[in-house]
């Protein structure tokens, strides 16, 4: 079977690229199409495929300023000739699903989220933009929304990475979606003996506004409890300015350092609303509980009162209350590890394989049944 995978851009290895890696395991023969391709920033597993960038890749500073070319991406997608493929898989977060497959082909879309910058986070992006961008955004976003809605009809079957995203697909595209949670490499993480667990809390992730790292820093400044923050981003310098003596802002760190702190923190602080959120599962795979804002993907992974606790409002007071509740909670690290295993990579491979075979209207041959792939 001839398979094409369309991924919005390949400039780093984040959650969307981890999903792409897992899909590549299912379809090792697949060709990959993308707007921008930075080979040095992509894993060997993805680089082993034939990769075709669109013309966006040839534009000035594309690897760094690719989002500036967003208005050109619909045209770039529609110029791709996919007539030779039987199965087209679009990996959607930026523009990817708007390709034009051959009419007999089956097009399935794995949606990390409808484009945030024109839908659910449009106003936040608008507020943070410069004067010229704010002038151009309304008409451009209006046209992109119309195109985005129209191209939903080019997809035969949608899968969403969470119930939260499935609801957005229903709201914006008026389409139903199967929920297939993203893969988590749970085998990369291990709990440590309790005597090695420290007295500090941990926050991990890109330091941007919607993830609310400021909320965590302010709460721990007030409580005078220890907090370690790992991650880079636009708020890094600001957080270092406001951090009190009990808050350590480490910036970006290696995977080994990240794993060390996951396993030894008292709990992970997850104060933002995410489409899904792999970080809480990495913490749970390390045997540690999670204190999370009770909206978005975390509500589908963290079990309140067992593997962590939720707080209902993004305020310092409710976060502090959640920390107090966690410290009184009877927590068993084995429960967190077991819960994380429900989202392991083999589980994703099995579910996505079944979804694709169902979309194709076929049964997997005995030699490659999803249970054996897993």
Image (spheres, rainbow, N blue to C red):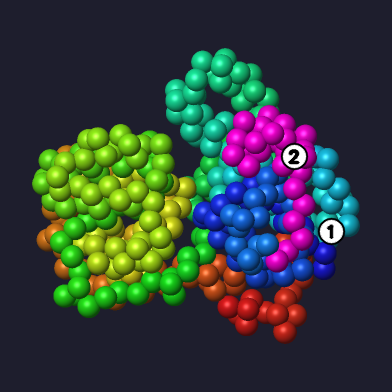
For disc 1, the marked residue is 85
Residue 43 in percent (x, y) is at 60, 62
Q: In the image, which residues are magenta?
A: 48-77
On the picture, is 209 further left or further right than 2?
left
For disc 2, the marked residue is 58
On the picture, is 164 further left or further right than 111?
left
The C terminus - image quarter: bottom right
Residue 327 makes an appearance in the image: yes
- Residue 328 vs 347, above or below: the answer is above
The Cα atoms of the two marked residues, 2 and 1, are separated by: 25 Å
Q: Are marks 2 and 1 in contact (CB under 8 Å)?
A: no
Residue 244 in percent (x, y) is at 16, 41
Residue 353 in percent (x, y) is at 65, 69
Nearest the camera: 209 or 91? 209
Q: Quadrant of residue 174?
A: top right
- Answer whether residue 72 is magenta in the image: yes
Nearest the camera: 263 or 338? 263
- Looking at the image, which residue is at 48% across and 65% down? 184
Farthest residue, direction bottom? 367
At label 2, counting other C-alpha atoms closer than 10 Å, the crowd grade (few under 14, some 14-19, many 20 or more) is few
Residue 352 makes an appearance in the image: no
Residue 136 in percent (x, y) is at 60, 18
Nearest the camera: 341 or 66? 66
- SS class, disc 1: loop
């Amino acid at each position: 079977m001839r398979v094409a995978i369309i991924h919005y851009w390949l400039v780093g290895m984040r959650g969307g690229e981890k999903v792409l890696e897992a899909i590549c395991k299912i379809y090792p023969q697949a060709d990959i199409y993308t707007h921008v391709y930075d080979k040095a920033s992509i894993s060997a597993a993805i680089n082993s495929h034939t990769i075709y960038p669109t013309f966006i890749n040839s534009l000035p500073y594309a690897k760094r300023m690719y989002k500036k070319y967003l208005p050109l991406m619909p045209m770039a997608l529609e110029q791709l000739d996919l007539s030779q493929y039987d199965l087209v898989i679009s990996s959607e977060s930026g523009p990817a699903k708007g390709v034009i497959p051959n009419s007999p082909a089956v097009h399935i879309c794995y949606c990390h989220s409808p484009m945030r910058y024109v839908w659910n986070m449009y106003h936040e992006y608008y507020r943070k933009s410069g004067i010229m961008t704010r002038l151009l955004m309304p008409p451009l976003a209006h046209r992109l929304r119309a195109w985005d809605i129209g191209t939903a009809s080019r997809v035969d079957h949608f899968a969403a990475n969470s119930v939260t995203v499935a609801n957005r697909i229903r709201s914006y595209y008026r389409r139903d979606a199967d929920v297939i949670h993203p893969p988590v490499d749970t085998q990369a993480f291990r709990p440590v003996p309790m005597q090695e667990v420290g007295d500090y809390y941990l926050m991990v992730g890109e330091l941007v506004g919607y993830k609310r790292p400021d909320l965590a820093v302010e709460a721990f400044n007030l409580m005078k409890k220890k907090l370690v923050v790992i991650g880079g981003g636009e708020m890094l310098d600001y957080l270092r300015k406001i951090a009190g003596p009990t808050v350590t802002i480490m910036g970006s760190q290696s995977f080994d350092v990240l794993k060390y702190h996951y396993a030894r923190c008292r709990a992970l602080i997850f104060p933002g609303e995410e489409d899904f959120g792999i970080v809480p599962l990495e913490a749970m795979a390390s045997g540690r509980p999670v204190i999370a804002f009770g909206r978005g993907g975390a509500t589908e992974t963290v079990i309140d009162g067992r593997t962590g606790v939720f707080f209902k409002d993004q305020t310092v007071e409710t976060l502090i209350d959640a920390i107090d509740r966690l410290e009184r909670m009877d927590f068993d690290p084995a429960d967190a590890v077991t819960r994380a295993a429900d989202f392991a990579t083999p589980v994703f491979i099995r579910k996505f394989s079944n979804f694709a075979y169902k979309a194709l209207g076929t049964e997997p041959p005995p030699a490659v049944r999803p249970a054996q792939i897993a």
